[in-house]
Amino acid sequence: MVDTKEIKNIKLTPFTRMSASIYAIIGLVSALIMLVILIIVQASGITTQLVPELANFNWITAVGIPLMVIIPLVSFIVTVAVSFISATLYNLLVPRLGGIKLELEGEDLEKIPVIAFSLITSAIGAIWAFIIGLLMAAFLSPFFSLISSLPIPPEITADISNATGTAINGSVVGSVGILVTLLLVIGLPIMVFVFGFIWNALFALLYNYLVTRVAKIKLNFSNITGSLYELTHIPVMPTALAVALLYALLGIISGILNQNYGEFITNFIWYFIATAIAARAYNYLAPKIGSIKLNME
């Protein structure tokens, strides 16, 4: 029997702690892979052949070992901020837009209702785009103000004016700055919302009608009290296969658009490995640091 649950609220601390810990582990695995590659490069002498000036450079101690600390640490810190803000935005938007709905049969995720999923995820993406656009505009605004206040050499002004048919002066540069600011603060969030909605809808549709015929994401929820649930366990292999197949299908579409026809292969491999690591890490960490807790109705 399919049971439809709507995620009404995400408990911030458990979600942030678990997300950051998983990304730190993925960062550590990535750093280990880089270290192995650098060891091979160092042992093979490729650097000496290609760049003789770096013949005595020790890639392992100078780059590989520091990355073992830097990548997991940066991954943890960045994910703490992103996860906390994203979950907060989700909780604030749910009363206005509705939450993500999951159609579950036992631990199988049978279906992701498309509109509910696409609307709130694209809205969160648009808010992030607004924040980033605002920061970029704040950074660029002094630059355009400085340029507009500087005298433009007559020969440059004449050349540009002759080429464009428009007189160039400081006010034109200032107008360009205003236009760029508007595009970043208004245009970017709108674009992210529209394209994000389409992409997220495609994500849900592909999962609902194609991926579930082969594999399904499995989520083991346990009721704590009332509408409060915790995600106690994630079966690794079926979930990794389902996610990998989903991103392989998305890779086929994006590969056709950007003429990178091998993207679906790299997508499948990367998302299978990353999802398997994330699921195993979650199952290991949940009893130790606490599982993700959600209010679902």
Image: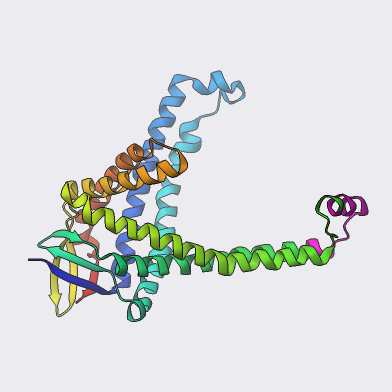
Q: Is residue 138 visible?
A: no
Q: Which residues are magenta?
A: 147-161
Identify the residue at the far right of this view.
Answer: 154
The image position of residue 197, as x and y in percent, is 39, 63
The image position of residue 13, as x and y in percent, is 32, 70
Q: Does 148 lie within the magenta span?
A: yes
Quadrant position of residue 175: bottom right
Quadrant position of residue 7: bottom left
Q: Is residue 155 left or right of residue 226?
A: right
Quadrant position of residue 199: bottom left
Near-viewer residue (131 or 28) = 131
Q: Does 91 lie within the magenta span?
A: no
Quarter of the image with the C terminus is bottom left
- Image height check: is 49 above or below 94? above
Query: What kind of secondary structure does the magenta stretch mostly adopt?
Result: helix
Q: Is residue 211 visible?
A: yes
Quarter of the image with the N terminus is bottom left
Near-viewer residue (219 or 37) = 219
The image position of residue 73, as x and y in percent, is 42, 53
The residue sitting at 84% across, 52% down in the picture is: 160
The residue sitting at 44% across, 44% down in the picture is: 257
The residue sitting at 45% across, 64% down in the picture is: 194
Q: Which coloring applies here?
A: rainbow
The residue sitting at 12% across, 60% down in the picture is: 107
Near-viewer residue (141 or 99) = 99
